[in-house]
């Protein structure tokens, strides 16, 4: 079984025997980092290219993706935004290979906080997210021109809300698990 694809190789500046300054390092697995180094660690701006085709280009602190950067995934997804200790965290834009786009806040690599999800068919959700799901107050603008504004839980209408069809028909009241329950709260 072969564990290493190539010998490690570093071309660049050194200080006290450590990588320091601008340089390019090829890891034994074949991954390549080119950019800034401080005391032997990736630190500053640089690009890391994985053997599977994924890449990260952005800011580094103590060998971790930290600050602003762009990550291109093997499946074609692209994230551009903030990172903390190697994790998507903060504000950013995630473009899915399906054509969908999310613009907003992330926590621990999940959509979390306020954001906007734009579907490839033209539908849009604007509102709160929790652990990658529509959760809290939000508004769905459907490609059909129907609109729902209200409360969501785990991607479904859940709580008080108002649905307005393209023809002007309105259902205002309470929703549970995505279904309209009427205009009385005691249905729950």
Image: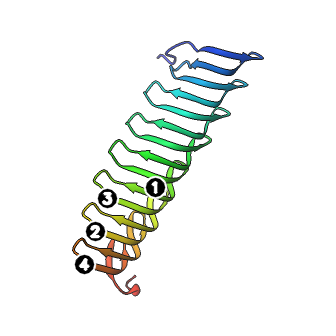
Do the residues under discs 1 and 2 have CB atoms within 8 angstroms? no
- Closer to the camera in the image, 109 or 97: 97
Q: Is residue 39 left or right of residue 168?
A: right
Residue 188, percent from left and from top:
40, 82
Precedes in sequence: disc 1 or disc 4 = 1
Determine which quarter of the picture holds residue 75. Answer: top left
Q: CA distance from mark 1 to mark 2?
A: 24 Å
Q: Of the residues under marks 3 and 2, which one precedes in the sequence?
A: 3
C-alpha span from label 1 to label 4 = 31 Å
Residue 60: assigned label: none
**Residue underneath mark 2:** 146
- In the picture, the disc for residue 132 is 1
**Residues at marks 3 and 2, CA–CA distance in whole angstroms:** 9 Å
Lower sequence index among marks 1 and 2? 1
Please tell me whether residue 22 is drawn above or below residue 121 in the rendered image: above
Residue carrying label 4: 169
| Contact, mark 2 vs mark 4 (Cβ under 8 Å) | no
Residue 56, given in percent of the width and then of the height, sits at 51, 33
Image location of residue 71, percent across then percent down: 49, 37
Lower position in the chain sequence, tag 2 or tag 4 = 2
**Of the pair 140 and 132, the residue shown nearer to us:** 140
Going 31% across and 50% down the picture, which residue do you hit?
A: 120
Q: CA distance from mark 1 to mark 3?
A: 18 Å
Q: CA distance from mark 2 to mark 4?
A: 10 Å
The residue under label 3 is 123
For the residues bearing labels 1 and 4, Cβ distance under 8 angstroms: no
Badge 1 marks a residue whose secondary structure is loop
Image depth: mark 1 or mark 2 in front: 2
- Nearer to me, 145 or 2: 145
Q: Judging from the image, what secondary structure is the residue with disc 4 in? A: loop
Q: Residues within 10 Å of mark 1 (few under 14, many from 20)?
A: some
């Amino acid at each position: 079984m072969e564990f290493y694809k190539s010998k490690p190789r570093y071309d660049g500046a050194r200080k006290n025997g450590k990588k320091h300054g601008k340089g390019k390092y090829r890891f034994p697995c074949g991954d390549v980092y080119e950019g800034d180094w401080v005391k032997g660690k990736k630190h500053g701006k640089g690009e890391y290219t994985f053997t599977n085709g994924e890449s990260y280009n952005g800011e580094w602190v103590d060998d971790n993706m930290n600050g602003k950067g762009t990550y291109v995934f093997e499946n074609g997804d692209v994230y551009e935004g903030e990172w903390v200790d190697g994790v998507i965290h903060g504000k950013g834009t995630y473009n899915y290979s399906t054509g969908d786009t999310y613009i907003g806040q992330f926590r621990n690599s999940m959509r979390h906080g306020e954001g906007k999800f734009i579907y490839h068919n033209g539908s849009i959700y604007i509102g709160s997210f929790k652990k990658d799901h529509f959760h809290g107050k939000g508004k769905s603008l459907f490609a059909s021109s129907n609109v729902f504004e209200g409360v969501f839980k785990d991607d479904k209408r859940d709580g008080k809300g108002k649905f307005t069809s393209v023809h002007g028909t309105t259902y205002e009241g309470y929703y549970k698990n995505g279904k309209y329950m009427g205009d009385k709260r005691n249905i729950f």
